[in-house]
Amino acid sequence: MGKIVILTGAGISTESGLGTFRDAGGLWERYPIEQVATPEGFARDPALVHEFYNMRRRDARAASPNAAHQALARLQRDWDGEVVIVTQNVDGLHEAAGASVLHMHGRLNGACCVACGARWDAPPRMSPADPCPACAAPATRPDITWFGEIPQHMDEIADHLISATVFASIGTSGQVYPAAGFVREAAQAGAHTIELNLERSDISAAFDERRTGKATQVVPAWIATLLPE
Ligand code: APR
């Protein structure tokens, strides 16, 4: 039955009440990227950065998975082959729906230590004075991949992309690399590629097939073609 590799972005969580980054009114219109999503911004003002992620952690914990997250979890459970879900999202909605996912941009529910590299589950609120539970240094940060940093799980993701028979991209604008390059890697390795998004993205032309609409509609409809009742 083959391997299906799925990349998700902020658009899959919009209908759960979490905003996107680049749509009108998106997060990056309200908060400058260089202040809240770069190592340099964190070094300049860690309290501001923690507040930004405390707010997003609170919103994400209050949100529930929607029909698109649930359909992907069902595909992962019932498909007669392998289904790998890679997300750029830092919310926990795929897991809340019962799926297992690779978080390439980290997790709001994760914390790590700049001094010793330890990782642990984030409390609801983090602050610059929090000591690391492993080495006690007051050098803790959200376990989030910021601009200028290397995303997580890249070797594993690369292996999955070259062995995919289907590659799907859901709810992402295709503006941020390396994720935006996954479609070409999968296509070069022979995968059929499909984009499911509210509108055409920057990389739509690279896909064999496109399904346009809201994630809660187009994702369950696509999955119904793969898992007939
Ligand atoms: N259903 C499907 N797609 C949607 C929906 C919806 N209900 N609502 C919005 N979209 C689409 C938008 O049309 C847009 O193409 O989701 C996409 C969201 O794009 P971005 O805001 O750029 O989010 P994303 O692609 O996930 O951003 C990638 O950028 O800033 C970084 O680290 C951050 O992981 C993030 C990365």
Image (spheres, helix red, strand yellow):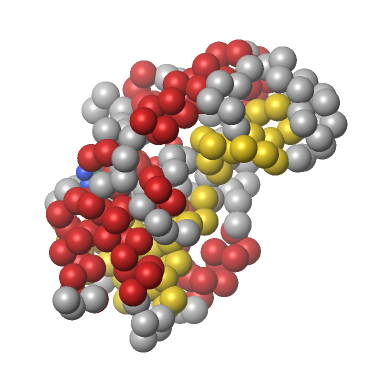
Say which quarter of the image contains residue 32: top left
Residue 205 position within the rendered picture, expressed as x and y whole percent measured from the top left: 26, 61
Lateral position of residue 134 relative to residue 72, left or right: right
Q: What residue is shown at x 34% (from left), y 77% (from top)?
A: 79
Query: In terms of depth relative to the viewer, which is nearer, 42 or 78?
Result: 78
Quadrant where the N terminus lies? bottom left
Residue 202 percent across, percent down from the top left: 30, 49
In the rendered image, which quarter contains the C terminus? bottom left
Which residue is painted at 47% across and 29% down in the image? 57
Answer above or below: position of 5 versus 45: below
On screen, residue 150 above or below 39: below
Along the viewing direction, whichever of 34 and 153 lies nearer the viewer: 153
In the figure, residue 78 lies in which quadrant? bottom left
Estimate the x, y position of residue 41 in percent, counting from the top left. 60, 21
Ligand 1 picture quarter: top left
Asked if residue 193 is positioned above or below residue 33 in the image, the reply reads below
Residue drawn at (36%, 52%) of the image? 97
